[in-house]
Amino acid sequence: MGRYILALLEAFRRMPELEVRPYARRPPAILGSQLLTPLAARHDRASLFHGPANALPLIRPGLPGVVTVHDLAIYEHPEWFPRGQWFATRVVVPHSIRHAQALICPSAATRAAIGRLFGVPAGRCHVIPHGVERAFGEPIEARTREQIRTKYQLPARYLLQVGTVQPRKNYETSLRALTKMPPASRLPLVAVGNFGWGYEPVTRLIADLQLKDWVRFVGYVGLEDLPALYQLAEVAIFPSLDEGFGIPVLEAFAAGTPLVASNAGAIPEVAGDAALLCDPLDAQALADNIQRLRDDPDLRGRLVAAGRSRAAMATWDASARAHGAVYESVARR
C-alpha cells in the first residue's frame, strides 16, 4: 500500500489541475485517524477525503469519501494474517465500504470480492490498475550489474521471488518446487522481502528439505536496486495464494524477466497471456513451468515481449488520471 500511495502522490505532482494534500497520522492512534485528521481536512476546505488503504475515518464532517480497497483476503482466509485486527475488519473497513461515495480497487477480482462480501453494486467500484516504475525497464550498465551482484551476493543464475515472507506469498510451494528439480539443473532461489508474520514454517521447511544452500534471503530491497535483481534473474516466480493485484507481475514484465506465477486472485487478470500460470499449491507444475522457460527460448522470448507490452500500458500517470476523474465525479455530486 505504501508503494501505491507514494507513486500516486508523485504522479499527482505532474497534474497541476489537481490539488492533493497528504495528512500524516496523528496521535493518539484511533482518535487521530478517526476524528482529528478529517477535522483538519475540513478546516483546509478539502472537497473530499480519500482513504488509500482500505479505510476512511468513521467521522467525516461534511466530507464525501473515496476509499481504495486493495484486497479482502483477510475475510476469506484469516489464517494468513495476525490476530487482533477486529476493529479494522469488523468496524472500520465495512463502514468505509458501505458509506464511501466511491470505491477504487486495483482489479476486477477485488471488485468481485467487494460485491461478494459486502453486497456493493459493481457500479460503485472503479477498477484502476496499478502502474510500474519506468526504472524496471531501463537497461542497467554492466558495472552496476556487477556491483549489485556483489552487494547482495547473488549467484550467477537464479530464480527470483519478491514478497514479504508470510503465508499468503506461498514460499513453501516455491521450496517444494526446488526439490522437484534435479540438483544438476536446479537454480537457487533469491527471496526479496522482509520476514513477516508467520514466516516460521518457511524456515523450518528449508531445514526439512535440506535446501539451506539453495535459498538466499536478501531482505527488503529498495527501488534503486530492485530492477537490477529482476534483470539479473533467469526466471521470476510469484506463486501467491491470493492477490488483489500483484505488482511483482508488472515488475518482472517491465524488466524483461520471464515469469511463472499462480492462477490465484487477480494474477491472471494482470498477467494475461504474458506468463505461465499454475495452481499455487502444485509444486510440480511450478517446477515444470520454470523448466519450460529455461528449455524453450522461443516461448521465453514470446512471453518477455508480451510482458513488456503489458507493462508499457501500466503507468502511474494513467492511474493518477483515473483517480482524478473519480475525485471530480464525487466532488461534483
Image (cartoon, rainbow, N blue to C red):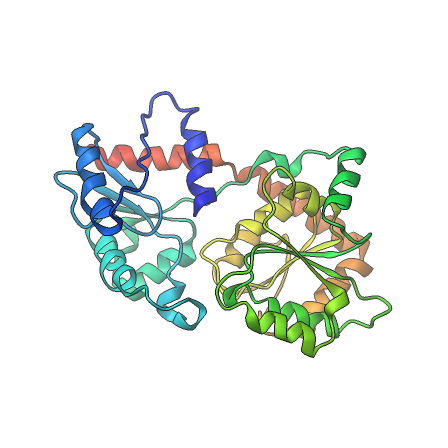
- Give the percent coordinates (x, y) of residue 52: 35, 44
Q: Outermost residue toward the bottom?
A: 208
Between 322 and 188, the one nearer to me in the picture: 188
Question: 263 or 137: which is nearer to us?
Answer: 137
| Residue furthest to the left | 62
Relative horizontal placement of residue 63, taking residue 247 as reference (left or right): left
At 30% across and 61% down in the image, what residue appears?
Answer: 115
Q: Position of residue 289 (x, y in %)?
A: 71, 65
- Regarding residue 285, the answer to whether it shows in the image is no
Nearer-the-camera pick, 251 or 307: 251
Q: Quadrant of residue 227?
A: top right
Q: Give coordinates of residue 169: x percent, y percent.
A: 54, 63
Q: Is residue 53 left or right of residue 165?
A: left
- Residue at far top of view: 16
Quadrant where the C terminus sits is top left
Q: Residue at x 67, y 72 (%)?
A: 206
Q: Is residue 190 above or below residue 37?
A: below
Residue 47 seen in render: yes
Quarter of the rendering containing residue 140: top right
* Vertical order, 252 against 174 (above or below): above
Looking at the image, residue 233 lies above or below residue 5: below
Figure label count? 0
Drawn side of residue 5 relative to residue 54, left or right: right
Going by the image, does 55 lie left or right of 184? left
Q: Residue at x 17, y 33 (%)?
A: 42
Q: List x then y, in percent, for residue 246.
A: 52, 53
> Residue placed farthest to the front in the image?
28
Q: Residue visible at 16% across and 43% down?
A: 60
Of residues 120 and 26, the one nearer the viewer is 26
